[in-house]
Image (cartoon, rainbow, N blue to C red):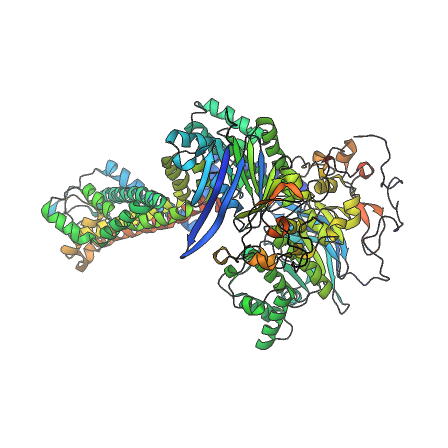
Amino acid sequence: MNDSTPPLSTPTGPQGLGHESLGPDGPGHDDTGPQEAPVLSVRDLEVAYRTGKQSRVRALRGVSFDLYPESSLALVGESGCGKTTLGLALLRLLPTLGEITGGEVTYTGGDGRSRDVTAMSASQLRRWRWSEAAMVFQGAQNAFNPVLTIGQQMAETLKDHARGGIGRREILERSAEALRSVRLEPRRVLGSYPHELSGGMKQRALIATGLLLHPRLLVLDEPTTALDILTQRTVIDLLAELRAEYGFAMIFISHDLALAAELADRVITMYAGKVIETGSTQDIFTAPKHPYTSKLINAVPPVTGDLPELASIPGAPPSLATLPPGCAFAPRCELATEECVQSEPELITLAQRPADMTHAAACIHHDQVHHERKVIARA
Amino acid sequence: MPAPAPLIELDGASQVFHVKGKDLPAVSDVSLSVGEGEVLCLVGESGSGKTTTARLAAGLAAPTSGAVRFEGKDLSEMTRAERREYRRAVQYIHQDPYASLNPIRSVRSTLAIPLKRHGLARTAADVDRRVDELLTTVDLTPPESYSAKFPHQMSGGQRQRVAVARGLTLSPRLLIADESTSMLDVSIRVSLLNMLTRLRTEEGVGFIYITHDLALAKYFAWEGRTAVMYLGKIVEVGPTPQVINSPQHPYTRALLEAVPEPDPELAAQKKAAGGLLSAEIPSLSDLPSGCTFHPRCPLAEDRCREIIPVLRTAPEASAQEVACMVVTDPQPAASAGTAPGGGGPP
Amino acid sequence: MTGAPPPVTSAPGAPAPERAAAVSPLRRLLSELTRSRSGFVGLCLVVAILLVSLLGPLVLGSQVVGDPMRAWEAPSGSHWLGLEGGGKDILHLLVTGGTTVLMVGFLAATITTVIAVAIGSLAGYFGGRFDALMLQLTDVVMTVPQIVLLAVVGAFYKLDSPMLLGVIIGILSWPVLMRSIRAQVLSLKEREFVEAAQLLDVGWVRIVFGEIVPNMASYILINFIIAVTNAIYAMVGLYLLGLAPQKGSNWGIMINDAWTKGAMFNPDAMAYIIAPVTMIVLLQLGLILLTRTLEEILNPRLRDR
């Protein structure tokens, strides 16, 4: 493993601000002048779940990132690494056993006003959710109430969250518009019950409900899991189009890295409740610097080109109640050394980029991560 | 002596369901075969009939017409003893590990029942030894820490492994694995596939693998064959590398286009909606005339509305059979309104 | 520790599960049983009545001897509930009168449950002609009026054994439970684990009684208890109406006796009618409350929470 041939794209400096030049390896994002304030600014977010009368486990440990308007961020990792918890915590939708125990989530609206989401009251949250930030939950099959029509459920969302009341006609117009935007026929869908729609149509109707009030932030939890491949493709294409059309910022949660490659400008890899790598989609996919990210990418089969060997990651993510000492990934990592067990590594900046696209990885051996796929058959 | 009959053979098998007075032809006239140590991948959307086809092969349903044969013997004409042998030789692994394990049974008890019933383990010590072996085969190690667990105490991936171990209790020669949806984590899915591949190469177990994702078909069945199904029919079949690298049927191409790529540059080149005209699969109760794919097909010509295509060898890819007239029997460019030349891979 | 951010570390959380595992099994059982407070009250009531009815006759003697000269004596220090028309001690009668009630209740419920589970699960699993036949049988049994049948049977045969009464009640009351068992089997048999068992060729006996029925265990147990309460009501009702032979002593006979002898108009004898009614009510209440605890313990999803 420890061969000495210098790899192609590792930062030459020991660590830190090695590559600041944007030129060669940053074609994914052209810099567009001065940046607006981020829609969402998350600092040191901590979430704990109660597991007993006295005991709690830390589900999120010091998560920080900025999300800029109209950008798209993918949260990736295996199940149980905290990505869904993060999505729920951002909108204060945690289940009753979960609690934000520290940190800040600052939301900046279109009017330029900033608010701390963690400090909002229940009525403030009610107004804020859906109109400013919406969530599309996992499992379109169960997200709708089976005894109400799609139209009734959309009307309820509008009545509950629209500013300063809303008339019948406007409800109808807005619902129809939202459905048309996801390429559904309003006349057919509004009066339908959930079971009368196919899985893909339900997923699209769910996205339409999220977009009813034109939020600036849309959080999607596994938007394409359990959908057929062609339906998946439709939803992926649709989300890309909608983002261009409505200009919302998007956070989506997925265990499938292929989805991130398709939809995200930027990727955050999570492990054991921490951000362990962050960077532009380009940086992450061409030269991941955390061994975990590299292995996650190598577990996804590509359909184009050579046939690579796919390797699973041995073992399973640690239980949050009994985290191993030092780097939480060390027990599953082939690069792990004594040092890894001693203290938990912090994010190390590998390449500075604007708009929080900075590539950083929490691995002291990041210069030994040579991302490549072993080819077993040529195309 | 003639060549040995394949393990499982479907010969013009059809399955028609009767639902609310309507006939739903879930599988129509499907022929395929799998031998010892071979792998066949069935690919298609939900509603394409891939799961029903697999259930026919597994003897979970009897075909309405046509035949299913095990080593040359028709399932419907088997004696009790032959049926028993078939039952032991062919096993089916369900796609949903949350539904396929009995919630009240521990892992050991789940595996012990078939072992005892078929006399493969007589004493408690025998059972323990076999259970440990099976759990080791499916990488649930150390086996002692799993054998006493109940399904609700395990993760989805671990449950799926137990389901595979149960399928292996009778030392089957053919495993039919249904993975029509991708609910498992990518890493878990890959380790399962690698484990199944090991069973095939080391123990000669044959496989029918069902998926909607051609990337998985490519990985799992590279040394075998892939059959693409659409509305109950096979529309393209051939060796996996050829089907993936030079797809002939427009539906196969759409499925390939639709697969998300773990590479941002390749992903950017994907065609919207896989190049299809419609994202929704027609209902089985109201099938389109002629070629059932024509309403969604970017290559459709007038004749596709009338003539039902049959599987033919593709002119430009001799290893594959394709059910598409535009590809196998191109009309002169003048009269073909839409696709010039017709059929050559891009 | 509400506001402060870092107090939750992974370290204090870690030993918690081990501590939980180290708790003695007896403690665990107790915590399981007290999970539902009303359920625990029910359990205590049932256990108390069972103990009194099973051990009481051993201590006090199962035969109650009375002195007819002291009929209808008011409650006193030596006879807490007073004496009845034959001069027998009411408390003693109350203690000995529970045995029959409980035995008939449990016997009838056992018969009902066994028949219902066996027929219901087989009819649901196999369907077809057997199912149709069994459904028609339930129609027939359900239309037979229990009380009238017992009156008729009682007219021709000597129903002098309460056990025979229990058997008749049991044989007549299975159809409702059978239908709901059958409905559950219809949905359970479509589950994939049943198909997996079929694929492994383990035989229908194992599939029905080894894979499907155990999944209804909590449902069956709860319905068994409900069947006990129903059987007790049916039996007491028959005694009260005088349709069952007034032989021996039990709470039903006591109520009938009190009723026919006009005890309710005699303030000194009020206990004779109130005491057995109270015992029956407490027993029934206890059984119903007990089902709550059973639900909590037997439902694995509730249990792990």
Q: Is residue B86 above or below residue C274?
A: above
Numbered marks: total: 0
* Horizontal relation, residue C128 to residue A286: left or right: left
Q: Residue B293 at x, y = what percent? A: 57, 55
- Front residue (pair B63, C1): B63
* Residue A4 can be seen in this image: yes
Q: Quadrant of residue A155?
A: bottom right
Could you say which quadrant of the image residue C159 lies in? top left
In the drawing, does residue B122 fall left or right of residue C127?
A: right
Q: Position of residue B305 (x, y in %)?
A: 56, 58
Q: Position of residue A182 (x, y in %)?
A: 63, 63
User: Quadrant of the rendered structure where residue C259 is?
Assistant: bottom left
Res. C243 visible in picture: no
**Which residue occupies the foreground of this view, A7 or C245?**
A7
Image position of A118 with respect to C82: above or below: below
Q: Residue at x 29, y 46 (%)?
A: C129
| Of C66 and B104, the residue lying toward us | B104
- C76 sits left or right of A190 in the view: left
State whether residue B325 is above or below residue B11: below
**Residue A223 at x, y percent in the picture:** 63, 54
**Residue B280 vertical position relative to residue B135 in the rendered view, above or below:** below
* Residue situated in front as seen by the camera: B232 or C239: B232
